[in-house]
Amino acid sequence: MEDSIHRENHHSDASSYANNNANDSHGWQKVTYAKRRKNQQQQQQPQSNKLSDKLRPNGTIAPVGEKGANNVFRAIEEQSEDRRRRIEAQSKAAMLVEGDDEFVSKGRSKAKARVEDDYSDDSEVDHVRDNGVDEKQKKAKKKEKKEKRPKVTVSEAASKIDAADLAAFLVDISGSYGDQEAIQLMRFADYFGRAFSGVGAAQFPWVKLFKESTVAKIAEIPLSHIPDAAYKISVDWINQRSLEALNSFVLWLLDSILADLVSQIASAKGSKKGIQTPPSKSQVAVFMVLAMILRRKPDVLVQLLPTLRENLKYQGQDKLPVIIWMISQASHGDLAVGMYSWAHHLLPMISNKSSNNPLTRDLILQLVERILSAPKARTILVNGAVRKGERLIPPSSLEILMRVSFPASSAQLKATERFEAVYPTLKDVALAGSPASKAMKQVSQQILSFAIKAAGEGTTPKLSREAQGIFIWCLTQNNDFYKQWDKTYLDNLEASVSILRMLSEEWKQLNLNQSSHESLKETLKSLRIKNEKELTGADAARQALIKDADKYCKVLMGRISRGHGCLKSVAVIVLVLAVGAAVISPNMESFDWKSVSTMLSSFQSTNS
């Protein structure tokens, strides 16, 4: 068809050349194809309007700027050049996405073929170009899609840890890095990081677990999954590391956990669904390593407590579950360390208005309840009440315990009964120690100071009565405290009256030795003299208190005197009987005088 059209046009052109040889066209006739012309009008309309005929009379193409320079061939060349540039640019972009040498070479061949075909058929070039771009874009999108990894649980990953391989690895890093303990510990963490690298955030949503679970449950996260053999090999290796290196490493692990916590909180606030971000490395490994260190070397936590108290980075309600988890791990290794950390770091939060809230109280109570529920906890804590020169429960913590366990009736909370339940054991730990020691005297001195103040708080009867009992306990620890009481008597008159009342009411239950009797007797005499002087000029309310105090002083002095009188009489009788028995005995030298002395001492102790 096209050949016939061409022949007809050629014949027409020849006739026109013969008849119009004198025309400016010199016989040249513009030949066009309908299909190509239509594509040119649709795709290059702006350019076609500008590129008009620019032919010289002899049929050659005039330079740009010269009249007759525009012609259809120049327009085609410019359009083809433009297409070639676009195709090459698209080919390069596709090659960058693929990143494959074979694909690059094929892409270049295809691009070259398209450029060559451009001159033959414009519509075919456009079709090839569009299809090529679509295919490459689809491939690029497929490459961008991340490959789905199989979901691995903590238990599955832990079960794959080979104890022999772990032991060989630890021997290797210990030999390779010598005294560089920091590097050894990092490599140790890397081993577990690789072991748990397949565990994603969805399989270990620790923030959610810590928020929704009890302290008893989170205490076993995630160590409950590790094989016993791998655990033993790890803690034995940890035990050989120095406390200095472990201190820095534990702080680094804690910082890693808190950084992940901040990231997840920020992600939850920025998204309605609160999608968790994938953990860096493996948070399972971080928790695993930190738990093993704290269980095997709990002293590390004791040394870090000042940093945790002073640095704001480690404070706040959102970080409290992590700190409680750490103390739980240390308690597993040493119950005394757990109690020390609880009393020195957590309990003071109760007296701080900014941190005292129901959630904080509940978490703090859960932890101490867990510590006290351990087998033989009371015996262990009372016997180890002093640890490396420091008391597990210092006097300041005992005062907090007294006030939260026995608040005013209007200030009672849901947690009050739980504090009252653990108070007796904690008080025994706080008061445990050798009475004759210098350290115990200092402790008793501090306790005496706040006990006499609390004893005078009539608005809280339970607190007042508990403080009275503790004050009397302090008197039995050292006779010098009687003198201190004498000095502060008038300043704490209401408290002193309540203490005198308790002494008189519970005289038979009190276990006072002979020296305490003498010190108390001298103190009561001094108090009566002060009462007599104070009555002059005192108001009615104060006079009533002084009269009550003087009444109890008389009662106590009478009981002390009767006790001494009975003791002397019985002692004389026993002594007379003993002498009589010795005289009657045929062998006076064989009489057991030591037994008589023991009997007298026993009787004295009973009546005191």
Image: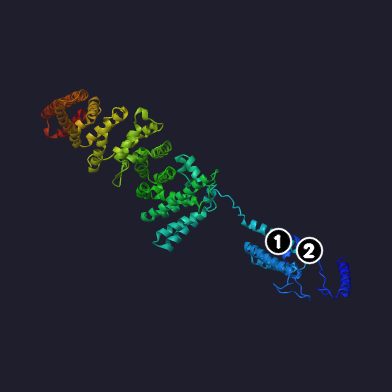
Q: Mark 2 falls on what kind of element?
A: helix
Cα–Cα gap, marks 2 and 1: 24 Å
Which quadrant, please, contains the C terminus?
A: top left
Name the colouring of the figure.
rainbow
Which quadrant, please, contains the N terminus?
A: bottom right
- 64 relative to 531 in the view: left or right: right
Which residue is pictured at 44% across the width and 40% down the height?
215
Q: Position of residue 39 (x, y in %)?
A: 76, 62
**Considering only vertical position in the picture, is 543 above or below 146?**
above
Instruction: Name the residue carrying label 2.
Output: 37
Which residue is pictured at 71% across the width and 62% down the height?
46
User: Toward which corner of the image does residue 173 lie, by quadrant?
Assistant: bottom left
**Considering only vertical position in the picture, is 569 above or below 394?**
above
Instruction: Name the residue carrying label 1.
Output: 132
Q: Nearer the viewer, mark 2 or mark 1?
A: 2
Q: Nearer the viewer, residue 429 or 550?
A: 550
User: Toward which corner of the image does residue 525 lie, by quadrant?
Assistant: top left
